[in-house]
Amino acid sequence: MQALSKRTQLIKKKSLFISCIVPVYNEQELIVKFISVLKTTLKQLTKNFEIIIVDDGSSDNTHNLITKLCKNKNIKALCFSRNFGKENALTAGLAYCAGDVAILIDSDFQHPIKLIYEFITKWVEGYSIVYGIQKNRQIKNPIRIYFTRLFYYLIKKISRVKIPANACDFRLLDRKVIDALNRLKERNRFMKGLYAWVGFKSIGIPFNVADRKAGKSSWNLFKLTELAITGITSFSNIPLKLLSVGGLLISGFAALCAIYIVFKTLIMGIVVPGYATILVSIIFFGGIQLFSIGIVGEYIARIFTEVKKRPNYIIEEQHGFTQKML
Ligand code: UDP
Ligand code: MG
């Protein structure tokens, strides 16, 4: 109750410290306009805000534009030494933001900036995480639609952490949540899973995803599949358990077949063996074994990345921060 009235007071006095984290990769057409609109929106909410642009190793003119933008008050930037991916850009922003709340938002106008008002209203009502739910996902590729559905279906079935379907990175996080997320040091980062894993009182707000104003999406089917596998392997061991159960069932079946064959041979003598049956079973079980090794391999590859303990990103340049970032 006390915390709630404190939240209301901060809004009334316009003194809530909002950190906006904007991951950016090759967005030269949009970045200047986007930051200007975002700044205007934030100014209406509070006197106290920072916009942290995370340049995820852009190779076009984005970096120069960001450097110029940082001459303005309240605008800061972290520039990576190469492209480390959106999940790591968000991770860096969260590590270095100082706000009472953080708002994560894409820089291509697909996330409606005005929704921030609703996020803040929900935060005042006592929610610690307020996330956008994409009502009309802008997915045109039918294969991608099918795999997205399959991914959410699987993750719902096999993960103990409840990851809401179609929730996106566009969200507000309270300081408690930011601190909790900053304690998670894993390398294979599936942010949507991590937000759900830390817990806290959360609510989703449905919104219509706008069309990208310019430029093109950096995600392709390969990158998305990689992220989906990270999502599943980071939040569930069930694929491994299924392998053990599957292996056991197949061995049981094989034992029954063996008994059957022994008895058949004892009773009927040796009959001409079925060439096709043997070939098919060898190929079938060979396939199952390779597939199983593949699944185990996915886990091992991720353990390998974790034990190397390489940092999630390298910051080459920083603008607008007082202390030195690593
Ligand atoms: N982005 C990033 N690093 C990447 C890919 C994308 O920081 O490797 C940023 C991008 O600039 C945008 C946001 O993440 O602000 C969402 O990317 P995009 O629009 O390509 O994804 P989609 O909207 O298609 O999911
Ligand atoms: Mg986009």
Image (spheres, grey):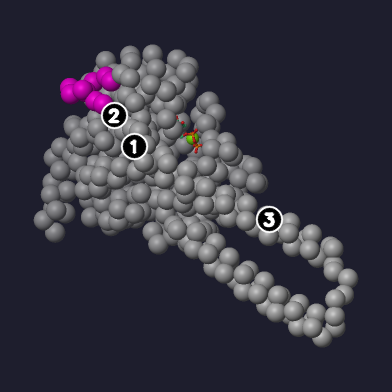
Q: Which residues are magenta?
A: 318-326
Is 176 placed left or right of 52 in the picture? left
Q: Position of residue 110 (x, y in %)?
A: 47, 36
Q: Nearer the viewer, mark 2 or mark 1?
A: 1
According to the picture, the residue beneath numbered tag 3 turns out to be: 286
Q: Amino acid at mark 1?
A: Lys
Q: Could one spot residue 107 in this view of the protein?
A: no
User: Which amino acid, mark 2?
Assistant: Ile
**Quadrant into which the C terminus falls:** top left
Q: Nearer the viewer, residue 276 or 36?
A: 276
Task: Name the image quarter holding the N terminus.
Answer: bottom left
**Gap between marks 1 and 3 measured at Cα:** 35 Å
Label 2 and label 1: CA atoms lie apart by 29 Å
Residue tagged 2: 51
Which of the two discs, 2 and 3, labels the residue nearer the N terminus?
2
- In the image, residue 207 above or below residue 27: below
Rounded to the nearest angstrom, the CA distance separating label 2 from label 3 is 54 Å
Left or right position of 73 against 302: left
Q: Earlier in the sequence, mark 1 or mark 3?
A: 3
Q: Nearer the viewer, mark 1 or mark 3?
A: 3
Packing grade of label 1 (10 A; few <14, some 14-19, many >=20) is few
The one of 64 and 46 positioned closer to us in this rendering: 64
Label 2 or label 3, whichever lies nearer to me, is 3
- Dot 2: what SS? strand
- In this orientation, which residue lies closer to the viewer: 14 or 204? 204
Which residue is the site of mark 1? Answer: 309
Q: Tag 3's secondary structure?
A: helix
Mark 2 or mark 1, earlier in chain: 2
Q: Residue at image x 85%, y 63%? A: 275
The answer to whether 263 appears left or right of 12 in the picture is right
